[in-house]
Image (tube, grey):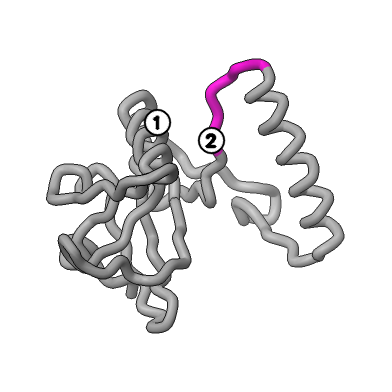
Amino acid sequence: MQEPKLKDGKFGVTKYNMGIQLEGIEGEQWLLNEFRRKEIKVFQPDAISVEDGNWILNEIKNQEVYDPPPFKGHGLPLWQVIARIGFWRFTGIRIRLIIKEKGTNIVYWQWLDVLEEGKHYDTQGNKPRRIYPIENYKLWI
């Protein structure tokens, strides 16, 4: 698969104009609500990249480390795990989970399918999270 390009040779540009960003957020929220109102399954990825000809869906979390028990780790809401793994199985596009650890600024990453194959822990409560052991991640270099 060939990587898409714009006329200037770049795939995409992010503009840091708060007014444009706020308008964009308003439009995105409207669209997501419309999909939900029409009962269309939807989730909003943080970033989609093309690397070495492969599409990658990137999920970024800026969070504190989860302290034991049962182990020190990082993760994401269980509903996001289910949605992203379903997307990967349906499309074949892998999901990369990137964690920026608050307080340390260490950045970890790993493929979500790799994390799912290993040990994990689901928290309890109204908003359960799936936590993966910190040793199952790689350092972002």
Q: Residues within 10 Å of mark 1 (few under 14, many from 20)?
A: some
Magenta stretch holds residue 40: yes
Residue labelled with disc 2: 43
| Residue occupying image coordinates x 19% and y 61% | 133
Left or right, residue 73 beside residue 103: left
Q: Which residue reaches farthest right?
A: 19
Residue 51 in the image: state x and y as whole percent.
Answer: 40, 52
* Residue in front for this viewpoint, 34 or 48: 34
Residue 55 in view: no
Q: Which residues are magenta?
A: 38-43
Q: Quadrant of the N terminus?
A: top left
Left or right, residue 1 beside residue 23: left
Residue labelled with disc 1: 87
| Residue occupying image coordinates x 86% and y 60% | 19
Look at label 1 and name its amino acid.
Answer: Phe
User: Looking at the image, is 81 positioned above or below residue 110?
Assistant: above
Residue 13 in the image: state x and y as whole percent.
Answer: 67, 58
